[in-house]
Image (cartoon, rainbow, N blue to C red):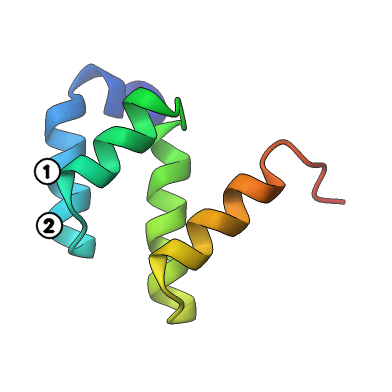
Amino acid sequence: MNSVARRDLDNFISQLSGTYDLSRPWIENLVKKESIPPADVYMIARTARVTSRPISTVEKYYKENRGRDGA
């Protein structure tokens, strides 16, 4: 997903924004400034929707646990 998204980042951002009702600047900030892989941004959005949690809560959890071994 990351390689496909990076080839057409504008399209990825548009689709993610539309599907999950997220602002483009929020997505662009995560991908471009915070260097979070597009697949991870997708998973943040998807997890928030599936768990009915605020996107900010899921984003915070992701950032606090990024790089940790899931085992």
Residue farthest to the top? Answer: 7
| Residue plotted at (25% across, 34% down) | 28
Please tell me whether mark 1 sits on a helix, a strand or a loop. Answer: helix
Q: Residue at x 49, y 78 (%)?
A: 51
Answer left or right for 9 relative to 4.
left
Image vertical order of residue 49 relative to residue 2, above or below: below
Q: Write the residue at 19% across / 41% down.
A: 25
Residue 4: x, y in percent? 30, 25
Image: 2 above or below 20 = above
Q: Quadrant of the N terminus?
A: top left
Given contact means CB atoms under 8 Å apart, are the residues at marks 1 and 2 in contact? Answer: yes
Q: Is 64 placed above or below 51 here?
A: above
CA gap, disc 1 and disc 2: 6 Å
Residue closer to the observer: 36 or 56: 56
Q: Which residue is mark 2?
A: 18
User: Residue 1 got which mark?
Assistant: none
SS for callout 2: helix
Amino acid beneath label 1? Ser
Amino acid at dot 2? Gly
Q: Residue furthest bottom?
A: 52
Question: Residue 54 appears at what percent x and percent y?
Answer: 41, 73
Residue 32 quadrant: top left
Instruction: Name the residue tied to disc 1.
Output: 14
